[in-house]
Amino acid sequence: MGALMCGIVAARVDGGAAPFLLRALSLLEYRGYDSAGVAIVTEDASTAVIRSVGRVGGLTTDVAAWAGAPLTGLGIGHTRWATHGAVTTGNAHPHRDCTGRISVAHNGIIENHRALRQELEADGHAFASDVDSEVVCHLIEDHLESSGDLLRSVHAATRRLEGSWALVVTDAETGRLVAAAHHSPLIVASSAIGDFVTSDIGAIADWVDEYRTLVDGDIVELADELVWTRDGQRTAAPQAALCPFTSAALERGSHADYMAKEIDEQPAIAARILDDLVPHIADGSLWRSLEAPAFERIAVLGCGTSLNAGRVIARAFGALGGIPTVSVVASEASETILDPGTLILALSQSGETADILRALDQLEPVSAGLVAVTNNPASSVARRAASVVDCNAGPEIGVAATKTFVAQVITGVAVAVSALVATGRIDRSRAADLTDDLRRLPDLLAQALEVSKGVVPGIVDEVLDRSGFIFLGRGPGVVFAEEGALKLKEISYRWAEHYPAGELKHGPLALVDQGTPVIVVDNGDPRLASNLSEVAARGGRVITIGGAGSTIPAVGMSMSRPLVGGMDRWGPLEAVVPLQLFARELALRLGLDVDKPRNLAKSVTVE
Ligand code: AGP
């Protein structure tokens, strides 16, 4: 079995395809890094299939060692994240048909693969792997035998498929290249350098200026011109979108890892977002520009860190404007009953998270409308929403979301304040005070970075050998405790749980013994003191993240009552900085790869 959630690429260039495929795969590696492979057509019209378990670095060595027929400029590549089934070279993509003529790389799940495999095997096809995707090769092989045409064969084969797919297919005999998509992201781009297909524009940003996105049912041949078909009919290619960034945005620069870079970028990103948004918040024009429908309630929808950002934004709607809110874990959306007049705010960094797309199938029809907040305005989630807010964080490569959390929160709170004033729930002067609070964030984030970098390494020294961590908060601090625990478990593989501090005595206090690290987001709530003495009395090691006098004094003005605005009601955003640095430092000390934690991938495109 091989349900996949991966990165795919195809190149059709003059000269050799290998360097393009390998460079793109290294940039796609964040989507999966169990195994990787390429299939490159050779000068004798066969295909070199080179695959290896592990990272793209290993594959690069194997490609360099290729001693067969010379490689041409036509090839496909794949980096894999297996949801089940063994991670083996045989299960790595690309896969081939019985003749070796057809090569296929696939992202998605073929749900009816068992029945198709049975049928194909009964017809005499020999399978070389356990993965669902291989059925696609053999289906195409069958149709190619009768039609002789790759494009028509891909059409015929995909008509038999149930599930989701982004496919790139080469025919070694004719040198043709076809791409197809259904419920899985895929883009094509052409430039003077050549033609490319990939899951994510970032992978090919070095070589193209613009790109076109396939929608469900699109099948495209990359020939001297793009042959675009939709639902089996020839159609005009969709309008091209401009490449949103240059390859420089993908470089790690002098930083030790992408996570370090992305944490460091946060103050500058906050400043850039606010420069764009501030003029449009207090007059309500930001909200009006979205043309979103009237609403009585807000449901924030997301997964992981994006859901945590959504919870902060929900708090802004609730605490600042009295709007009833609910937060919906996307994978549990089928359990949710939305009240009438509920507007959905869907948060997704990638905009490709399958759980969110499925949740929208269920919830959107019974909602008042949908606003998408995403870092990818060309994504599947964005394409479904009439109103889209670009959270504008730039590409995030580290699997652990950091700068996109900050960008989502700032963008979302700006939207919330603008919505409240545009719909008459608060007046302009109150909105202006709230906007003034937002303007402080770049400085608060910068201070938090500076303070935390000095203090966090020493604290990590003390807790390096601890296997479990507890994160606490109260009120607006709880969601930050949750985000801190998520970061820690994600990259350090240590157990970490978060609780509202008041819940401790209802059970989790039993976990505390001599030296148990208890990390507290201290928002100045006076009730925290007694919760912390309960921990200290049992020998727990209390680490507070708060204002002056706390263990990590990284929280500035945002929680102090004299603020004219209302950041104390939804903040403190800057508390996330020491939490991110704490998780990263611990993971590094444990010798772990903070950018590519085990078992995870950046975009979770399977349910
Ligand atoms: C965060 O550190 C995680 N990698 C993960 O929880 C992530 O936030 C989640 O999978 C949602 O992804 P999205 O924002 O792309 O939808």
Image (cartoon, grey):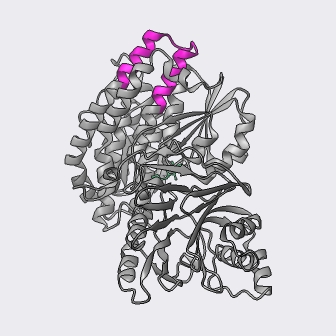
Is residue 67 rendered to the left or right of residue 380? left
Residue numbers of the magenta segment:
412-438
Of residues 362 and 250, the one drawn nearer to the viewer in this rendering? 250
Would residue 23 be counted in the magenta stretch? no
Query: Residue 215, position in %: x, y?
Result: 64, 51
Determine the main secondary structure of the stretch shown in magenta.
helix
Quarter of the image for residue 115 reads bottom right
Query: Residue 230, position in %: x, y?
Result: 70, 53
Number of numbered discs on residues: 0
Is residue 47 rendered to the left or right of residue 580? right
Would residue 417 be counted in the magenta stretch? yes
Compared to residue 457, the image places residue 317 above or below, namely above
Compared to residue 473, the image places residue 526 above or below, namely above
- Quadrant where the N terminus is found in the figure: bottom right
- Quadrant where the C terminus is found in the figure: bottom right
* Residue furthest front in the image: 224
Residue in the image at 36% along x and 16% along y: 564
Compared to residue 123, the image places residue 133 above or below, namely above
Is residue 180 visible in this depiction of the protein? Answer: yes
Quarter of the image for residue 218 reads bottom right
Residue in the image at 49% along x and 72% along y: 75
Of residues 552 and 322, the one drawn nearer to the viewer in this rendering? 322
Is residue 504 visible in this depiction of the protein? Answer: no
